[in-house]
Amino acid sequence: MGKAEESRLYVGVDLHKTQLTVCAVSEDGEIRHEGVYPTDNIGYSRFCRRMHIEERKGYIIEMAVESTGNARYFKNRMEAEFFAVKVVNTSKFKVITLSTKKTDANDAYTLAYYLMKEMIPEAHLCSQTSEELRRMLKTRSILVQSGVKIKNQLHGMMLGYGIETKGAQFQSKKKRQELIGDLEDQYSEFTASSLEVTLSILDGIIEEQIKVVEKQLRDMVKENDTVELLQTIPGIGFIGATTIAAYTEDLSRFDGDFKRFAAYLGIVPSVHDSNETHRRGKITKHGPQDLRTAFVQVALGLIRQKNKYADWRLIQDYNKKKENKGSGRAIIALTRKVARIVFAMLHSREPFNPALMVGEHQQTKQAA
Protein backbone atom coordinates (compact mmCIF):
# COMPACT_ATOMS: atom_id res chain seq x y z
CA MET A 1 0.00 0.00 0.00
CA GLY A 2 1.41 3.36 -0.97
CA LYS A 3 1.48 6.72 0.70
CA ALA A 4 -1.95 8.06 1.62
CA GLU A 5 -0.98 11.70 0.83
CA GLU A 6 -2.72 13.28 3.81
CA SER A 7 -5.96 11.36 3.49
CA ARG A 8 -7.91 10.56 6.64
CA LEU A 9 -8.13 7.35 8.61
CA TYR A 10 -11.30 6.97 10.67
CA VAL A 11 -10.85 4.85 13.77
CA GLY A 12 -13.81 3.51 15.73
CA VAL A 13 -13.01 2.42 19.28
CA ASP A 14 -15.29 0.16 21.30
CA LEU A 15 -13.96 0.88 24.78
CA HIS A 16 -14.48 -1.37 27.78
CA LYS A 17 -12.95 -1.63 31.24
CA THR A 18 -10.29 -4.21 30.33
CA GLN A 19 -9.90 -3.88 26.57
CA LEU A 20 -10.55 -1.72 23.54
CA THR A 21 -11.56 -3.04 20.12
CA VAL A 22 -10.62 -0.86 17.16
CA CYS A 23 -11.45 -0.66 13.48
CA ALA A 24 -9.62 1.78 11.19
CA VAL A 25 -11.31 2.66 7.88
CA SER A 26 -9.82 4.78 5.10
CA GLU A 27 -11.77 7.34 3.06
CA ASP A 28 -12.38 4.81 0.29
CA GLY A 29 -13.97 2.40 2.80
CA GLU A 30 -10.98 0.06 3.10
CA ILE A 31 -10.49 -1.50 6.53
CA ARG A 32 -6.82 -0.87 7.18
CA HIS A 33 -6.64 -2.26 10.68
CA GLU A 34 -8.68 -4.25 13.17
CA GLY A 35 -7.46 -5.23 16.59
CA VAL A 36 -8.05 -5.72 20.29
CA TYR A 37 -5.79 -4.12 22.90
CA PRO A 38 -5.80 -4.34 26.71
CA THR A 39 -6.50 -1.07 28.53
CA ASP A 40 -3.17 -1.03 30.35
CA ASN A 41 0.00 0.91 29.58
CA ILE A 42 1.32 -1.82 27.32
CA GLY A 43 -1.96 -2.06 25.40
CA TYR A 44 -2.28 1.70 24.94
CA SER A 45 1.36 1.94 23.82
CA ARG A 46 0.88 -0.83 21.24
CA PHE A 47 -2.26 0.83 19.91
CA CYS A 48 -0.57 4.24 19.64
CA ARG A 49 2.43 2.74 17.85
CA ARG A 50 0.08 1.11 15.33
CA MET A 51 -1.67 4.42 14.72
CA HIS A 52 1.64 6.26 14.33
CA ILE A 53 2.62 3.73 11.64
CA GLU A 54 -0.49 4.74 9.70
CA GLU A 55 0.30 8.37 10.39
CA ARG A 56 3.77 8.00 8.84
CA LYS A 57 2.09 6.61 5.71
CA GLY A 58 0.37 9.97 5.36
CA TYR A 59 -2.93 9.41 7.16
CA ILE A 60 -4.52 12.00 9.45
CA ILE A 61 -5.98 10.01 12.34
CA GLU A 62 -9.49 10.73 13.63
CA MET A 63 -11.06 8.62 16.36
CA ALA A 64 -14.57 8.10 17.75
CA VAL A 65 -15.27 6.48 21.11
CA GLU A 66 -18.52 6.07 23.02
CA SER A 67 -19.00 8.00 26.24
CA THR A 68 -18.05 5.57 29.01
CA GLY A 69 -16.47 5.81 32.44
CA ASN A 70 -12.94 5.73 31.02
CA ALA A 71 -13.64 7.74 27.84
CA ARG A 72 -12.04 10.86 29.33
CA TYR A 73 -8.84 8.97 30.12
CA PHE A 74 -8.79 7.53 26.59
CA LYS A 75 -9.37 10.96 25.04
CA ASN A 76 -6.64 12.59 27.14
CA ARG A 77 -4.17 9.83 26.32
CA MET A 78 -4.88 9.93 22.58
CA GLU A 79 -4.76 13.72 22.40
CA ALA A 80 -1.36 13.58 24.12
CA GLU A 81 -0.31 11.59 21.03
CA PHE A 82 -1.88 14.34 18.85
CA PHE A 83 -4.79 12.22 17.62
CA ALA A 84 -8.19 13.91 17.23
CA VAL A 85 -10.90 12.22 19.31
CA LYS A 86 -14.67 12.63 19.28
CA VAL A 87 -16.61 11.28 22.26
CA VAL A 88 -19.99 9.98 21.12
CA ASN A 89 -23.22 10.98 22.85
CA THR A 90 -24.72 7.49 23.26
CA SER A 91 -28.21 8.82 24.03
CA LYS A 92 -28.29 10.38 20.55
CA PHE A 93 -26.51 7.55 18.75
CA LYS A 94 -28.88 4.56 18.75
CA VAL A 95 -27.28 2.78 15.78
CA ILE A 96 -25.08 0.64 18.03
CA THR A 97 -27.58 -0.04 20.81
CA LEU A 98 -30.26 -1.10 18.31
CA SER A 99 -27.90 -3.15 16.15
CA THR A 100 -28.92 -6.74 15.46
CA LYS A 101 -25.27 -7.74 15.13
CA LYS A 102 -23.98 -6.70 18.54
CA THR A 103 -20.26 -7.45 18.69
CA ASP A 104 -17.33 -5.29 19.74
CA ALA A 105 -15.78 -5.50 16.26
CA ASN A 106 -19.05 -4.48 14.58
CA ASP A 107 -19.55 -1.62 17.05
CA ALA A 108 -16.03 -0.34 16.32
CA TYR A 109 -16.68 -0.48 12.56
CA THR A 110 -20.01 1.33 12.99
CA LEU A 111 -18.30 4.13 14.91
CA ALA A 112 -15.62 4.42 12.21
CA TYR A 113 -18.21 4.43 9.40
CA TYR A 114 -20.38 7.16 10.92
CA LEU A 115 -17.30 9.19 11.83
CA MET A 116 -16.30 9.04 8.15
CA LYS A 117 -19.81 10.22 7.18
CA GLU A 118 -19.59 13.07 9.73
CA MET A 119 -22.72 11.76 11.46
CA ILE A 120 -21.32 11.34 14.98
CA PRO A 121 -23.26 13.23 17.73
CA GLU A 122 -20.60 14.47 20.12
CA ALA A 123 -20.92 14.36 23.89
CA HIS A 124 -19.87 17.37 25.90
CA LEU A 125 -16.96 16.71 28.24
CA CYS A 126 -16.41 19.18 31.02
CA SER A 127 -12.96 20.42 32.04
CA GLN A 128 -10.74 18.36 34.30
CA THR A 129 -11.36 20.89 37.10
CA SER A 130 -15.14 20.45 36.87
CA GLU A 131 -14.72 16.68 36.66
CA GLU A 132 -12.72 16.66 39.90
CA LEU A 133 -15.30 18.89 41.56
CA ARG A 134 -18.14 16.58 40.48
CA ARG A 135 -16.32 13.53 41.82
CA MET A 136 -15.77 15.23 45.16
CA LEU A 137 -19.45 16.18 45.32
CA LYS A 138 -20.37 12.60 44.49
CA THR A 139 -18.13 11.39 47.33
CA ARG A 140 -19.95 13.69 49.73
CA SER A 141 -23.31 12.46 48.42
CA ILE A 142 -22.31 8.83 49.04
CA LEU A 143 -21.25 9.68 52.59
CA VAL A 144 -24.49 11.55 53.29
CA GLN A 145 -26.57 8.68 51.93
CA SER A 146 -24.59 6.23 54.07
CA GLY A 147 -25.31 8.38 57.11
CA VAL A 148 -29.03 8.38 56.32
CA LYS A 149 -29.01 4.58 56.01
CA ILE A 150 -27.28 4.19 59.37
CA LYS A 151 -29.78 6.53 61.03
CA ASN A 152 -32.65 4.57 59.53
CA GLN A 153 -31.11 1.38 60.90
CA LEU A 154 -30.85 3.01 64.32
CA HIS A 155 -34.52 3.97 64.23
CA GLY A 156 -35.37 0.38 63.32
CA MET A 157 -33.13 -0.98 66.07
CA MET A 158 -34.74 1.21 68.72
CA LEU A 159 -38.24 0.40 67.47
CA GLY A 160 -37.37 -3.26 67.85
CA TYR A 161 -36.78 -2.57 71.53
CA GLY A 162 -40.08 -0.75 71.84
CA ILE A 163 -38.59 2.75 71.78
CA GLU A 164 -39.83 5.17 69.11
CA THR A 165 -37.17 7.69 68.12
CA LYS A 166 -36.98 10.85 66.03
CA GLY A 167 -34.10 12.19 63.94
CA ALA A 168 -33.20 14.92 66.42
CA GLN A 169 -32.50 12.36 69.13
CA PHE A 170 -29.41 11.16 67.27
CA GLN A 171 -28.12 14.72 66.85
CA SER A 172 -28.03 15.59 70.55
CA LYS A 173 -25.38 14.02 72.81
CA LYS A 174 -27.74 14.34 75.77
CA LYS A 175 -30.55 12.52 73.93
CA ARG A 176 -28.13 9.82 72.82
CA GLN A 177 -27.00 9.16 76.38
CA GLU A 178 -30.62 8.95 77.47
CA LEU A 179 -31.29 6.29 74.80
CA ILE A 180 -28.20 4.33 75.85
CA GLY A 181 -29.30 4.57 79.46
CA ASP A 182 -32.82 3.35 78.59
CA LEU A 183 -31.37 0.29 76.84
CA GLU A 184 -29.11 -0.50 79.78
CA ASP A 185 -32.00 -0.20 82.21
CA GLN A 186 -34.51 -2.21 80.18
CA TYR A 187 -32.18 -4.78 78.62
CA SER A 188 -28.41 -5.09 79.17
CA GLU A 189 -25.10 -3.33 78.70
CA PHE A 190 -24.52 -5.42 75.55
CA THR A 191 -27.70 -4.09 73.98
CA ALA A 192 -26.62 -0.54 74.80
CA SER A 193 -23.14 -1.28 73.41
CA SER A 194 -24.64 -2.10 70.01
CA LEU A 195 -26.18 1.37 69.89
CA GLU A 196 -22.92 3.00 71.02
CA VAL A 197 -20.89 1.23 68.33
CA THR A 198 -23.31 2.26 65.57
CA LEU A 199 -23.31 5.86 66.79
CA SER A 200 -19.50 5.87 66.87
CA ILE A 201 -19.47 4.75 63.21
CA LEU A 202 -21.88 7.56 62.36
CA ASP A 203 -19.77 10.16 64.19
CA GLY A 204 -16.25 8.86 63.72
CA ILE A 205 -16.39 7.76 60.10
CA ILE A 206 -19.35 9.29 58.29
CA GLU A 207 -19.72 12.72 59.89
CA GLU A 208 -15.97 13.34 60.18
CA GLN A 209 -15.34 12.36 56.57
CA ILE A 210 -18.18 14.62 55.42
CA LYS A 211 -16.42 17.51 57.17
CA VAL A 212 -13.13 16.59 55.48
CA VAL A 213 -14.76 16.46 52.04
CA GLU A 214 -16.59 19.76 52.57
CA LYS A 215 -13.31 21.43 53.56
CA GLN A 216 -11.71 20.11 50.39
CA LEU A 217 -14.65 21.41 48.37
CA ARG A 218 -14.24 24.87 49.89
CA ASP A 219 -10.53 24.80 49.05
CA MET A 220 -11.33 23.77 45.47
CA VAL A 221 -13.79 26.64 44.86
CA LYS A 222 -12.23 29.39 46.98
CA GLU A 223 -11.51 31.38 43.81
CA ASN A 224 -14.65 30.32 41.95
CA ASP A 225 -16.72 33.45 41.29
CA THR A 226 -19.73 31.42 40.15
CA VAL A 227 -20.16 29.74 43.55
CA GLU A 228 -20.05 33.14 45.25
CA LEU A 229 -22.51 34.57 42.70
CA LEU A 230 -25.01 31.73 43.15
CA GLN A 231 -24.99 32.03 46.93
CA THR A 232 -26.63 35.45 46.59
CA ILE A 233 -29.86 33.55 45.79
CA PRO A 234 -32.05 32.91 48.87
CA GLY A 235 -32.54 29.21 49.50
CA ILE A 236 -29.23 28.10 48.04
CA GLY A 237 -26.37 26.87 50.22
CA PHE A 238 -22.72 26.17 49.57
CA ILE A 239 -23.22 22.60 48.33
CA GLY A 240 -26.07 23.59 46.00
CA ALA A 241 -24.08 26.50 44.57
CA THR A 242 -21.00 24.32 44.10
CA THR A 243 -23.02 21.60 42.36
CA ILE A 244 -24.61 24.06 39.93
CA ALA A 245 -21.21 25.66 39.23
CA ALA A 246 -19.64 22.25 38.56
CA TYR A 247 -22.23 21.42 35.88
CA THR A 248 -22.64 24.83 34.20
CA GLU A 249 -19.06 25.72 33.39
CA ASP A 250 -19.67 26.07 29.65
CA LEU A 251 -23.00 27.75 28.91
CA SER A 252 -22.05 28.64 25.33
CA ARG A 253 -23.24 25.21 24.14
CA PHE A 254 -26.84 26.30 24.87
CA ASP A 255 -26.55 29.38 22.61
CA GLY A 256 -28.42 31.53 25.14
CA ASP A 257 -31.53 29.34 24.77
CA PHE A 258 -33.08 28.55 28.16
CA LYS A 259 -35.25 25.82 26.66
CA ARG A 260 -32.11 23.89 25.71
CA PHE A 261 -30.73 24.42 29.20
CA ALA A 262 -33.98 23.22 30.79
CA ALA A 263 -33.90 20.14 28.53
CA TYR A 264 -30.33 19.49 29.71
CA LEU A 265 -31.56 19.64 33.31
CA GLY A 266 -34.37 17.21 32.50
CA ILE A 267 -37.08 19.51 33.91
CA VAL A 268 -39.11 19.78 30.70
CA PRO A 269 -42.21 17.62 30.17
CA SER A 270 -42.01 14.61 27.90
CA VAL A 271 -44.14 14.95 24.76
CA HIS A 272 -46.16 12.17 23.13
CA ASP A 273 -47.54 12.79 19.64
CA SER A 274 -49.84 10.35 17.86
CA ASN A 275 -51.90 11.42 14.86
CA GLU A 276 -53.85 14.44 16.17
CA THR A 277 -53.18 13.66 19.83
CA HIS A 278 -50.64 15.83 21.63
CA ARG A 279 -49.97 14.84 25.24
CA ARG A 280 -47.42 16.22 27.70
CA GLY A 281 -46.24 13.82 30.37
CA LYS A 282 -43.93 13.88 33.36
CA ILE A 283 -40.56 15.62 33.19
CA THR A 284 -37.92 13.76 31.18
CA LYS A 285 -35.31 13.58 33.96
CA HIS A 286 -32.61 13.56 31.30
CA GLY A 287 -29.24 15.03 32.14
CA PRO A 288 -27.23 15.04 35.38
CA GLN A 289 -29.34 13.92 38.33
CA ASP A 290 -27.14 15.76 40.84
CA LEU A 291 -27.65 19.06 39.02
CA ARG A 292 -31.42 18.56 38.78
CA THR A 293 -31.54 17.68 42.48
CA ALA A 294 -29.60 20.84 43.33
CA PHE A 295 -32.17 23.01 41.57
CA VAL A 296 -35.05 21.21 43.26
CA GLN A 297 -33.35 21.77 46.63
CA VAL A 298 -33.11 25.51 45.90
CA ALA A 299 -36.84 25.54 45.13
CA LEU A 300 -37.60 23.66 48.36
CA GLY A 301 -35.43 26.13 50.27
CA LEU A 302 -37.56 28.99 48.95
CA ILE A 303 -40.75 27.12 49.83
CA ARG A 304 -39.57 26.70 53.43
CA GLN A 305 -39.27 30.51 53.57
CA LYS A 306 -42.36 31.30 51.50
CA ASN A 307 -43.91 33.46 54.22
CA LYS A 308 -40.81 35.65 54.16
CA TYR A 309 -41.04 36.02 50.38
CA ALA A 310 -44.83 36.06 50.09
CA ASP A 311 -44.77 39.14 47.82
CA TRP A 312 -42.53 37.45 45.23
CA ARG A 313 -44.29 36.51 42.00
CA LEU A 314 -42.72 33.08 41.84
CA ILE A 315 -43.92 32.24 45.39
CA GLN A 316 -47.41 33.50 44.53
CA ASP A 317 -47.36 31.39 41.35
CA TYR A 318 -46.22 28.41 43.41
CA ASN A 319 -49.14 28.82 45.84
CA LYS A 320 -51.65 29.01 42.98
CA LYS A 321 -50.15 26.01 41.20
CA LYS A 322 -50.13 23.98 44.40
CA GLU A 323 -53.80 24.75 44.98
CA ASN A 324 -54.82 23.87 41.42
CA LYS A 325 -52.37 21.15 40.37
CA GLY A 326 -50.88 19.77 43.59
CA SER A 327 -47.53 20.24 45.33
CA GLY A 328 -45.52 17.98 42.98
CA ARG A 329 -46.26 19.98 39.84
CA ALA A 330 -45.94 23.23 41.76
CA ILE A 331 -42.42 22.31 42.93
CA ILE A 332 -41.33 21.45 39.38
CA ALA A 333 -42.79 24.70 38.05
CA LEU A 334 -40.92 26.64 40.72
CA THR A 335 -37.75 24.71 39.93
CA ARG A 336 -37.99 25.80 36.28
CA LYS A 337 -38.37 29.43 37.36
CA VAL A 338 -35.32 29.11 39.62
CA ALA A 339 -33.37 27.56 36.75
CA ARG A 340 -34.33 30.48 34.49
CA ILE A 341 -33.11 32.96 37.11
CA VAL A 342 -29.82 31.09 37.49
CA PHE A 343 -29.41 30.89 33.69
CA ALA A 344 -29.83 34.68 33.43
CA MET A 345 -27.45 35.33 36.33
CA LEU A 346 -24.74 33.10 34.87
CA HIS A 347 -24.94 35.08 31.63
CA SER A 348 -25.11 38.56 33.15
CA ARG A 349 -22.71 37.72 36.01
CA GLU A 350 -24.80 40.00 38.24
CA PRO A 351 -25.95 38.95 41.74
CA PHE A 352 -29.51 38.05 42.58
CA ASN A 353 -31.79 41.10 42.70
CA PRO A 354 -34.81 40.68 45.04
CA ALA A 355 -36.44 43.80 43.54
CA LEU A 356 -37.01 41.90 40.29
CA MET A 357 -39.06 39.28 42.12
CA VAL A 358 -41.99 41.59 42.89
CA GLY A 359 -44.40 43.32 40.52
CA GLU A 360 -44.59 47.07 39.99
CA HIS A 361 -47.60 47.31 42.32
CA GLN A 362 -45.69 45.69 45.18
CA GLN A 363 -42.61 47.83 44.50
CA THR A 364 -44.71 51.03 44.69
CA LYS A 365 -46.39 49.78 47.87
CA GLN A 366 -43.03 48.96 49.48
CA ALA A 367 -41.58 52.35 48.49
CA ALA A 368 -44.56 54.12 50.04
Image (spheres, rainbow, N blue to C red):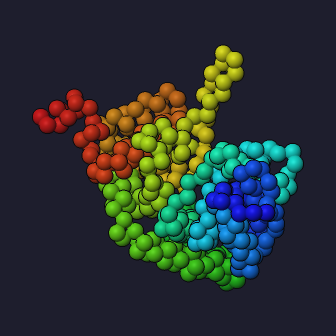
Q: Residue at x 66, y 44 (%)?
A: 119
Q: Residue at x 53, y 65 (%)?
A: 131
User: What is the residue that sits farthest to the front in this orientation?
Assistant: 2
| Image-based side of 319 in relation to 229, left or right | right
The answer to whether any part of residue 133 appears in the image is no
Residue in the foreground of this view, choosing between 238 and 222: 222
| Image-based side of 137 in relation to 313, left or right | right
Q: Position of residue 195 (x, y in %)?
A: 64, 76
Location of residue 245 with respect to 175 vertically, above or below: above
Residue in the foreground of this view, choosing between 147 and 229: 229
User: What is the residue that sits farthest to the left in this orientation?
Assistant: 368
Q: Which of the image's four quarters has the N terminus?
A: bottom right
Q: Position of residue 36 (x, y in %)?
A: 81, 68
Location of residue 18 with respect to 365 vertically, above or below: below
| Image-based side of 203 in relation to 189, left or right | left
Q: In the picture, residue 286 is in which quadrant?
A: top right
User: What is the residue that sits farthest to the top in this orientation?
Assistant: 276
Q: Residue at x 36, y 50 (%)?
A: 346
